[in-house]
Image: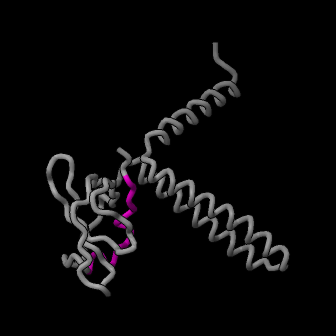
Amino acid sequence: MRLPRSITAATWLSNAILKHRRTYAGIPGFFKKRIVNTLCLSFLLLYGGCALGLAQRSAGFVGWTVFLTICGIGDAVYVYYLAVTRSYEVVEGTVSEIHAELFFDGFTRVIVLQSDGLTTELLLNKRTNVMHGKSYRFYFNQNAHAFSGIHRLDAAFDFGNFFGVEEVKE
């Protein structure tokens, strides 16, 4: 006996929702926070921008607001895609050294001691807040390529290679 078309569509939708719920549960907290914050800001921009645009009777203002909201939603979808496909590399460990070499260059050299005893040297932006002796998880683009081979120049032209950092609670 064949089920009615509406029941099969409902079960398909239910299965799809359960699949995405399980997928979302497997995403690291850093990416979840970034996705939710980006979506909240996008919808806040949509609400505020449309309200101001309609109050001023400016179709251009509303149009740009909708365009920027779509860009924000697209960024959140891209981060979700990266997290689901695991297209990122994780460096996890305790910060053992922090070297701010030059005052004006904007970079900090951070030495991370991993749990297996290996050390990793990271060249991060000075705005990235890390503290000596604390454990962190650093997220990088897995498919990042060096453009010039000069570490400082490649770090200066960071085209989305460093996603962010999250403190590891022990």
Tell me the quadrant of the picture where the C terminus can be found. top left
Q: In the orientation shown, which residue stands out farthest toward the top?
A: 1
Q: Is residue 43 above or below residue 17?
A: below
Quarter location, residue 163: bottom left
Point 29% across, 65% down: residue = 144
**For this view, does 24 lie left or right of residue 163?**
right
Point 63% across, 63% down: residue = 42
Q: Is residue 57 above or below residue 87?
A: below
Q: Nearer the viewer, residue 38 or 23?
A: 38
Q: Is residue 118 above or below residue 50?
A: above
Q: Nearer the viewer, residue 23 or 104?
A: 104
Tell me the quadrant of the picture where the N terminus can be found. top right
Question: Could you tell me how many numbered marks the image carries?
Answer: 0
Quarter location, residue 40: bottom right
**For this view, does 113 lie left or right of residue 57?**
left
Residue 163 part of the magenta-drawn span: yes
Point 61% across, 31% down: residue = 14
Name the spot of residue 124 as percent of width and height, x first.
Answer: 31, 70
Q: In the orientation shown, which residue stands out farthest toward the bottom?
A: 104
Name the spot of residue 162 as percent of width and height, x first.
Answer: 35, 65
Q: In the orientation shown, which residue stands out farthest toward the front?
A: 133
**For this view, does 9 lie left or right of residue 148?**
right
Span of residues in magenta: 153-167
Name the spot of residue 60 as percent of width and height, x first.
Answer: 74, 79
Residue 12 part of the magenta-drawn span: no
Q: In the orientation shown, which residue stands out farthest toward the left?
A: 117
Point 19% across, 60% down: residue = 120
